Amino acid sequence: MTEVRLARPEDLDGILDVGRETWRTAYVPLAGEAFVREGLERWWTAEGTLPSIADERVWVADDNGLIVGMAMYGIEERTAHLWKLYVRPGYQGAGIGRALLDRVLDATRGAVDDVVLAYMDGNGLARGFYERMGFVETHREPSELGGPDDVWMALSLHATDPEVRR
């Protein structure tokens, strides 16, 4: 049984493993090995993750001791930035991504008006998932690492669309 809960410091290795597995699977075909290596070195580190765990801004999906998914966010003014939401490929399609996103939305309710995120252009799985969750594209920017564009999306937490649960 997969449990979605707040991350603890002892989850760090599992969280970083999720990043290594998902980034290679999703981004090597779109941007290449060098892009993935640089992204992992820049954004999937203990120094970049432990402060967010301490601030209770990281959620994990724990399947009997194996971290199979994670979500990390930050808040700036009244906007939540969903920096990471990744589920190991063998666990995708089981509702884990939705459960992780739901925890982030629940945790930010009342504190933010919108949730924003970016995914890599060409990542159709990410685009489809976020569109199903009610996000809409707002703009595109060049990738910091030189890969395909970052596609930015937003979810208004005040939306009246019945598909948006918030």
Image (cartoon, grey):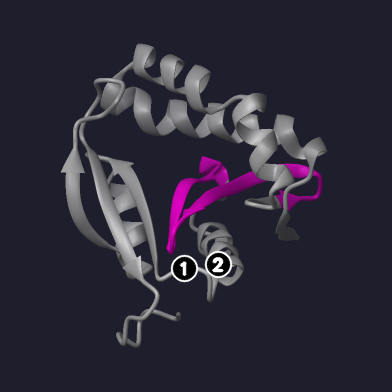
Q: Residues within 10 Å of mark 2 (few under 14, many from 20)?
A: many
Q: Please state which amino acid type lies under the numbered disc 2.
A: Thr
Cβ atoms under marks 2 and 1 closer than 8 Å: yes
Tell me what residue is drawn at x 26 percent, y 29 percent: 143
Q: Is residue 102 above or below residue 60?
A: below
Amino acid under disc 1 = Val
Q: Regarding mark 1 in the picture, which secondary structure is present there?
A: loop
Task: Please say if 43 is above or below 64.
Answer: above
Q: Circle 2 — which element?
A: helix
Q: Residues within 10 Å of mark 1 (few under 14, many from 20)?
A: some
Location of residue 106 by image quarter: bottom right
**Residue 4 lies within the magenta run:** no
Please state if 123 lies on the left or on the right of 8 as rendered.
left
Vertical arrangement, residue 67 with respect to residue 1, above or below: above
Q: Residue at x 29, y 25 (%)?
A: 144
Q: Which residues are magenta?
A: 62-90
Q: Could you say which disc has been placed on residue 108 in the image? A: 2
Position in image of residue 18 (x %, y %): 59, 35
- Prevailing secondary structure class for the magenta stretch in the rendered image: strand
Measure the alpha-carbon separation of dots 2 and 1: 6 Å
Does the segment drawn in magenta span residue 77? yes
Residue sitting nearer the eye, 157 or 98: 157
Q: Position of residue 35 (x, y in %)?
A: 35, 18
Residue occupied by mark 1: 112
Q: Residue at x 32, y 43 (%)?
A: 119
Figure label count:
2
